[in-house]
């Protein structure tokens, strides 16, 4: 059991016998009464979305999950392949179940896999990731308007808007929650 106040993004909860992963959480304190957590969850099995309002002191059932640190090996068109660095156990994750993660997975990178009843239900992507710029347009000197940006494509295919001075083959840090440029990495 987990209290409403302890629920964070990425928490796995059981609702109607199915595992749901929390994708958004917002606290609200009304003028009277107890604070509440508004939670938006996505079903692991069928992708349906459920929204709940939970008083912060109320307990809800959390899913008994196992979290493993694994290295991303590669992907083919249908499967992401991971390996546990300690046990050398292999985990295959269908691309169709987590297609939105494909732009953040880098070969050789370490990720946390959330496993429920022997099935990988989530891949935790770090908050900030360093990417190499694969494609970038050049800009002409003098095109510098304050805050001007241009789109670049990373080696994984992610498109991000960056300042004009970023060039091809440079490394940039990206916020994975908002897909926004953070800084250039040397």
Image (cartoon, rainbow, N blue to C red):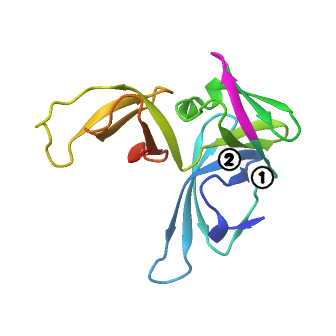
Looking at marks 2 and 1 on the same chain, the residue that comes earlier in the sequence is marked by 2
Looking at this view, name the residue that lies furthest to the bottom: 32
Image point (64%, 25%), residue name:
95
**Label ID, residue 63:** 1
Q: Is residue 164 magenta?
A: no
Quarter assignment of residue 105:
top right
Quarter assignment of residue 169:
top left
Q: Under tag 2, what secondary structure? A: strand
What is the total number of numbered labels drawn onto the structure image?
Answer: 2
**Label ID, residue 82:** none
Is residue 137 rendered to the left or right of residue 180? left
Image point (48%, 47%), residue name:
177
Q: Under tag 1, what secondary structure? A: loop
Image point (53%, 82%), residue name:
33
Q: Which residues are magenta?
A: 70-78
Q: Main secondary structure of the magenta part?
A: strand
* Residue holding disc 2: 20
185 or 177, nearer to the observer: 185
61 or 147, nearer to the observer: 147
Q: Position of residue 18 (x, y in %)?
A: 74, 44
Is residue 130 rendered to the left or right of residue 151? right
Looking at this view, name the residue that lies furthest to the left: 142
The answer to whether marks 2 and 1 mark residues whose Cβ atoms lie closer than 8 Å is: yes
Answer few, some or many: residues within 10 Å of disc 1's Cα (few below 14, many 20 plus, some between 14 and 19). Answer: many
Looking at this view, name the residue that lies furthest to the front: 186
Q: Position of residue 20 (x, y in %)?
A: 68, 47
Q: Is residue 72 magenta?
A: yes
Identify the image quadrant of the N terminus. bottom right
Answer few, some or many: residues within 10 Å of disc 2's Cα (few below 14, many 20 plus, some between 14 and 19). Answer: many
């Amino acid at each position: 059991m987990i209290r409403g106040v302890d629920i964070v993004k990425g928490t796995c909860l059981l609702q109607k016998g199915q595992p749901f992963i929390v994708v958004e959480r917002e606290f609200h304190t009304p003028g009277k009464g107890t604070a509440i957590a508004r939670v938006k969850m996505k079903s692991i099995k069928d992708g349906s979305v459920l929204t709940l309002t939970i008083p912060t002191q109320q307990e809800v059932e959390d899913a008994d999950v196992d979290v493993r640190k694994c290295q991303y090996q590669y992907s083919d068109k249908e499967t992401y392949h991971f390996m546990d660095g300690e046990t050398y156990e292999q985990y295959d994750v269908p691309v169709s179940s987590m297609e939105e993660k494909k732009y953040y997975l880098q070969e050789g990178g370490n990720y946390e896999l959330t496993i429920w009843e022997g099935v990988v239900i989530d891949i935790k992507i770090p908050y900030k990731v360093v990417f190499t710029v694969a494609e970038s347009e050049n800009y002409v000197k003098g095109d510098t308007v304050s805050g001007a940006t241009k789109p670049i494509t990373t080696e994984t295919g992610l498109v991000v808007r960056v300042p004009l001075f970023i060039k091809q083959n440079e490394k940039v840090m990206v916020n994975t929650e908002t897909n926004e440029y953070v800084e250039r990495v040397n």
